[in-house]
């Protein structure tokens, strides 16, 4: 693998959808927190076994195996036999206990994944125009209205989409976006903000997922983003 793989939470209390776990160790236990057991990734649900599944790396490949859980571990809707390893590929859907917990596996750096489609240069005249009339921001409700469709955001999600919409069709660098979204995390030496790649990836993932039907956010690898409507 070229970089550390990720697990992205689609569903699973207590984590927010879009939470990203970077698999940096040789093995990761998945399950429910107990008095004498603390898995690496712990979900708060009685249908998840304490020792539910194990994710591990072997010869550069990532495998998952069910630890004889009561309600099962599934890869792409296929239930795994207990203790039988299953190699994960990029984009595989991993679920526990019949979709009570749903995770997506990413074997490629998330920035590169978003950049798979070729970047099309934005027309210079268009980049200087304000965002279209069918796109409206509401900072009080923290919503975005696109052609009659209302999208609701958390505070950080809204700050992200707000700046990108305000710069509709223009390139927005990471150096501009991060302090706008996380002003409280600015470094005292003036050298950027203390925000991890996982936090940025998780935020962009959640925003993209919410607006996927109407908005496209193009990633310029390692540099920044451009927002347009579909």
Image: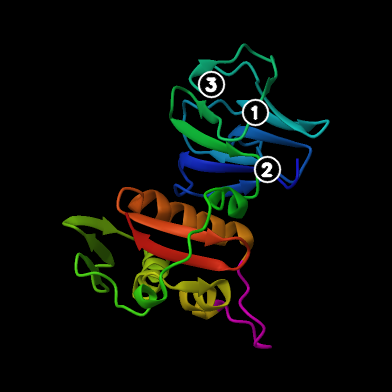
Q: Nearer the viewer, residue 79 or 52?
A: 79
Q: Magenta stretch: give its range.
A: 185-195
Tag 1 residue: 88
Does 230 appear above or below 67? Answer: below
Residue at mark 2 to residue at mark 1: CA–CA distance: 10 Å
Furthest-right residue in view?
Answer: 59
Element marked by disc 3: strand
Q: Earlier in the sequence, mark 3 or mark 1?
A: 3
In this rendering, position of residue 190 left or right of residue 212: right
Tag 2 residue: 5
Q: Which mark is residue 74?
A: 3
Furthest-bottom residue in view?
Answer: 189
**Residue 189 colored in magenta in the image:** yes
Q: Nearer the viewer, residue 26 or 180?
A: 180
Does 49 appear above or below 24? Answer: above
Q: Earlier in the sequence, mark 3 or mark 2?
A: 2
Element marked by disc 2: loop
Name the front one of labels 3 and 1: 1
How packed is label 1: few (under 14 Cα within 10 Å), some, or many (20 or more)? some
Q: Nearer the viewer, residue 56 or 168?
A: 168
Q: Is residue 71 visible?
A: no
Give me the residue at 46% from left, 40% from top: 10
Give me the residue at 30% from left, 53% from top: 214
Image quadrant assignment for residue 226 = bottom left
Q: What's the colour scheme? A: rainbow
How packed is label 3: few (under 14 Cα within 10 Å), some, or many (20 or more)? many
Q: Check contact, mark 2 vs mark 1: CB within 8 A.
A: yes
């Amino acid at each position: 693998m070229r970089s550390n793989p990720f697990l992205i939470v689609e569903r699973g209390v207590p984590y927010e959808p879009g939470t990203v776990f970077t698999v940096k160790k040789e093995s990761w236990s998945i399950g429910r927190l107990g008095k004498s057991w603390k898995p690496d990734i712990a979900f708060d649900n009685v249908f998840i076994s304490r020792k539910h599944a194990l994710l591990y790396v072997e010869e550069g490949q990532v495998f998952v195996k069910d630890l004889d859980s009561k309600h099962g571990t599934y890869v792409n809707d296929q239930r795994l036999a207990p203790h039988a390893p299953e190699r994960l590929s990029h984009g595989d859907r991993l679920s526990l206990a019949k979709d009570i917990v749903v995770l997506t596996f990413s074997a490629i750096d998330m920035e590169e994944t978003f950049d798979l489609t070729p970047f099309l240069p934005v027309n210079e005249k268009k980049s200087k125009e304000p965002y279209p009339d069918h796109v409206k921001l509401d900072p009080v409700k923290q919503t975005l209205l696109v052609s009659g469709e209302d999208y609701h955001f958390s505070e950080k999600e809204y700050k992200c989409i707000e700046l990108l919409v305000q710069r509709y069709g223009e390139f927005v660098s990471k150096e501009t976006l991060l302090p706008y979204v996380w002003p409280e995390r600015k470094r005292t030496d003036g050298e950027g903000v203390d925000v991890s790649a996982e936090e940025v990836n998780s935020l962009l993932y959640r925003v993209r997922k919410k607006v996927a039907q109407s908005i496209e956010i193009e990633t310029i690898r390692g540099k920044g983003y451009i927002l347009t409507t579909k």
